[in-house]
Amino acid sequence: MREAPLRAGLWLALALLGIGLVLPLGTVLLRAFEDAEGGFAGLANILAYARTPALRLAAWNSLWTAALTTLLTVPLAFLYAYGLTRACLPARPAFRAVMLLPVLAPSLLPALALITLFGNQGLLRGMLGGGSLYGPVGIVAAQVFYCFPHAAIILSVALGMADARLYEAAAALRAGRWRVFWTVTLPGARYGLVSATTVVFTLVVTDFGIPKVIGGQFPVLATDVYKQVVGLQNFNMGAVVGLVLLLPAVGGFLLDRWAEGQRSATLSGRAVAYQPRPRPARDVPLLLLCLLVAGFLLGIVGVACWSSLIRFWPWNLSLTLDNYDFARFDAAGWGTVWTSVRMAAWVALIGTPLAFGTAWLLERGAPGGLLSSVLRFVAGLPLAVPGLVLGLGTILFFNHPANPLGFLYGTLGLLVLNSLVHFYTVPHLAAVTAIRQLDPEFEAVGASLRVPALLTFARVTVPICLPAILDIAVYFFVNAMTTVSAVIFLYGPETKPASIAVVHMDEAGQASAAAAMACAILGVTVAVKLAQLAMAGVVERATQGWRAR
C-alpha cells in the first residue's frame, strides 16, 4: 500500500508531460499530413515543401549558419574554459561571472546591440566595408555571443575533471607539451566537445529571436515557421516546417546520447585533482584571450544598456530614461515585465518540486517497471524539441475545438505549462545527478526504522540536496524570463511576456525601447542570480556543515 502514493506521483508527472509535450508534438505530426479541410493529405504537404525553393533555401541557410557559428564558438569556448581550468589566472571568479551574462539576457539583446554598432545607422557601420549587418553576418555574430556560455560551461566541466596522475606520468615520460595536449587533454575532453558542438548547433538552428531581429530578408527555418503560422495562417505547412526544424535538434540529441553511451569513466576513486602551476608562456596568452572575450561580452551588454538610454537614435544621442516608460510603446507598459516575473515564478515554484520529486521517485522511491522507463524517456525528450515546434504543437492542440482543455489557451497557465515542459530536461538531469550522489543507506536505514519513505525524503534528501534544488529553481526562472520562441504563439492580450514585447517594439522601429525592455529582463534575472548567490552561503552552512572535516 505504501507504493501506491509513490506510483501515483509518477503517473501525475507522466500526465503533465503528456499533456504539455507528447500530445502537442503528436498534433504537429498529424497536421503535417492533413489538408486545409482536415482530411488526410498523405505526403502532399511534404512534397509541396520540397518543391518550394524558398523553403529549401531556408533549411540550407539554417544549416550553414549553424555550422559556421559552431566552428567559431566551440574553439573559442574551449580556449576560454582551458584558461579557467588549466591556467593560473587572476580574478577567475570574475571571468566565470562574465561568462554567464548571455545566459541571463534574452537572445534578442545581442542582436539589438549589434544593430546599434553596425546597423544602417550604426556607430561603426563603416567597419563592414560596405557590407550589411542584416543577414548571415549579424545572425552569426549575435549567435556567437548567445551560444558562447553554453559551450564554455560544458567544456569547463569537461576540462575540470582531469586526473593529475596522467600529467605526472606524461612528465615522467618526458612528453612534450603539445604531445600531452593531443594525447591527454583532448581525449579527456572529447565528450565535452561533442556535447558543446551539438548544443551550439541545435541552439542556432532553433533560435527565433536573433534571426527575427537581425536576419533582414535572410530566411531561416525558425522565421519560416513564424511566417507560415502568423503571416499566412497556413498551419499545415507550418507543421511541416516544424518537423524539418525538429530533425537537426533530434539528430544532435541522438549524437549526444551516443557519445554519452560511449563514454568511459574519466575519474576513478583514486583520481587526484589537477592543480595548474604558474607558467607565463601559457598563462599570459590565455589571460589576454579571456580579457578579450570578457570585454566582448561586457561590451555587447554595455552597448545594449547605453542604447536603452538614448533619446532618439541616431539623431539625438542625449541620455534619457523615457525609453523605460514602456506605456508609451506598449499598452501593457511595465505589465509585460510583471507578467514575465509571475510566469517565471510559477514555473520555478511548480517545476522545481516536480522535477526533483519525479527524479527521486525514479531513483529511490517507486519500484522500476514500464511506467518508470516511459517516464525516463519522456523526461529527456524536451531537450530535443525546439521551442517553436513545441509552441506550434501547443497552439494546435489546445486550440482544437474538441479539446476540453481549450479554456487554457491565451492564459498565463498555458504559458507556465509550456515553459515548464520546454525547460524540464536539464533540471530533471540535475536532480537525478544530485540524488545519485547520496548513499542509498539513507533510505535503507529509514525503512529499517519503519519511517515512511516520504518522511525520509522530506527530512534527509531535501535538506542535503537543497543547493541543487536552488540551482534548479533559478534555472527554471531565468529561462522562463528570457524565452521567446516557445511562447511566441501562445500569449493573449493580457498575458504578453516582456520578451515578446521586445520583438514587437523592434518590429515597430522602437529600437531604444526594445533595448530598454531587454535590459529590464536582464536586470530581473541578474537580481535573481545575485539573490541565489547570497542564499547559497546560508544554505551551505545550514545544510552542508556536517560534510566538513
Image (cartoon, rainbow, N blue to C red):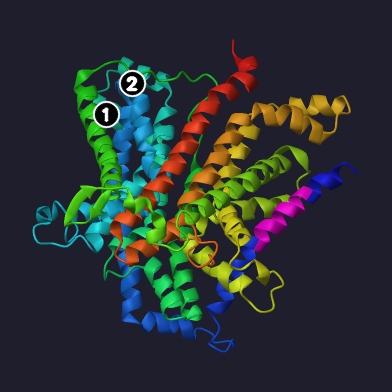
246 sits left or right of 429 in the view:
left
> Residue at image x 40%, y 74%?
227
When asked about the image quadrant of residue 541, the answer is top right
Residue placed furthest toward the top: 549
**Circle 2 sits on which residue?**
170
> Residue at image x 40%, y 51%?
106
> Residue at image x 31%, y 80%?
53
Residue 292 percent coordinates (x, y): 22, 35
Q: Give the range drawn in magenta.
A: 9-19
Q: Do the residues labelled 1 and 2 touch (CB within 8 Å)?
A: yes
Q: Nearer the viewer, residue 336 or 254?
A: 336
Q: Nearer the viewer, residue 511 or 7?
A: 511
Which image quadrant: the N terminus? top right
When asked about the image quadrant of residue 469, the answer is top right
Type of amino acid under label 2: Ala
**Is residue 253 covered in magenta?**
no
When asked about the image quadrant of residue 80, the answer is top left
29 sits left or right of 184 in the view:
right
Q: Can residue 413 be seen in this view?
A: yes
Q: Residue 179 carries which label?
A: 1
SS class, disc 2 = helix
Residue 207 percent coordinates (x, y): 40, 59
- Reply above or below: 218 against 259: below
Q: Which of 35 and 63 is in front in this view?
A: 35
378 sits left or right of 167 in the view:
right
- Reply above or below: 414 against 1: below
Residue 63 percent coordinates (x, y): 33, 63
Q: Which secondary structure is most common in the magenta stretch?
A: helix
Residue placed furthest toward the right: 1
- Reply above or below: 240 against 113: below
